[in-house]
Image (cartoon, rainbow, N blue to C red):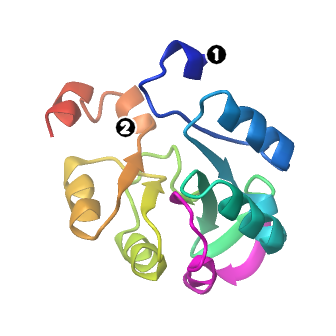
């Protein structure tokens, strides 16, 4: 309904997309990109097929805690370091990667600059950073280090980052 109501706004949808049918229904409804997580990690052949079927329209969610990739809604550690996982996606025509540091998500603690820099360096795709983005200086850091974008939550909800100031940047 949102994609229909705002056809000129690129909508990205994630959460629970575990089948071709679900992805197809969203993309055919006008969604610009779908975000896939656990199944993409668990089933690389499925991810490869999805990315090739919809080039530039599949984003891989990579949730981490202390540099380790998580699965199943942040409940299971894989033991896989994010710097080792991201290069395995190099040959896929993805829209990008959504990297969330779940240890900082919603805590207003700021980003882990070293961890963000490692993710940005390791990814062969555009990266959107999520989890702890709190200050304009952090936004500048991420921009300088090649982030394609950020996901803002608590910093905007609490007024720590002013939406008007952000829009002017």
Toward which corner of the image does residue 9 lie, by quadrant?
top left
Q: Quadrant of the N terminus?
A: top right
Is residue 166 shown above or below 121?
A: above
The magenta-colored residue range is: 76-97
Label 2 Cα crowd, 10 Å radius (few <14 / some 14-19 / many 20+): many
Q: Write the residue at 73% across / 69% down.
A: 48
Is residue 15 shown above or below 31?
A: below
Q: Residue furthest top?
A: 5
Horizontal and vertical percent position of residue 20: 83, 49
Question: Which label was assigned to residue 155?
Answer: 2
Q: Please name whichever residue, 75 or 62, is drawn nearer the observer in this view of the structure.
A: 62
Residue 81, magenta (yes or no): yes
Which is more N-terminal, label 2 or label 1?
A: 1
Toward which corner of the image does residue 169 lie, by quadrant?
top left
Label 1 Cα crowd, 10 Å radius (few <14 / some 14-19 / many 20+): few
Q: Is residue 82 visible?
A: no
Front label number (1 vs 2): 1
Residue 36, magenta (yes or no): no
Q: Write the residue at 64% across / 76% down.
A: 68
Q: Please name whichever residue, 110 or 86, is drawn nearer the observer in this view of the structure.
A: 86
| Secondary element at tag 1 | loop
Question: Which label was assigned to residue 1?
Answer: 1
Q: Is residue 135 visible?
A: yes
Toward which corner of the image does residue 117 lie, by quadrant?
bottom left
């Amino acid at each position: 309904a949102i994609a229909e109501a705002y056809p000129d706004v690129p909508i990205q949808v994630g959460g629970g997309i575990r089948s071709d049918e679900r992805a197809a229904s969203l993309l055919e409804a006008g969604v610009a990109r779908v975000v896939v997580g656990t199944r993409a990690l668990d089933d690389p052949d499925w991810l490869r097929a999805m990315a090739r079927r919809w080039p530039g329209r599949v984003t891989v969610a990579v949730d981490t805690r202390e540099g380790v990739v998580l699965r199943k809604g942040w409940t299971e550690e894989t033991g896989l370091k994010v710097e080792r996982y991201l290069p395995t996606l190099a040959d896929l025509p993805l829209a990008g990667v959504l990297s969330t540091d779940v240890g900082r998500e919603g805590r207003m603690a700021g980003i882990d600059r070293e961890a963000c820099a490692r993710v940005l360096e390791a990814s062969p795709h555009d990266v959107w950073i999520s989890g702890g983005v709190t200050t304009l200086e952090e936004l500048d850091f991420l921009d300088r280090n090649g982030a394609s974008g950020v996901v803002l939550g608590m910093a905007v909800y609490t007024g720590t980052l002013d939406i008007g100031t952000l829009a002017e940047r």
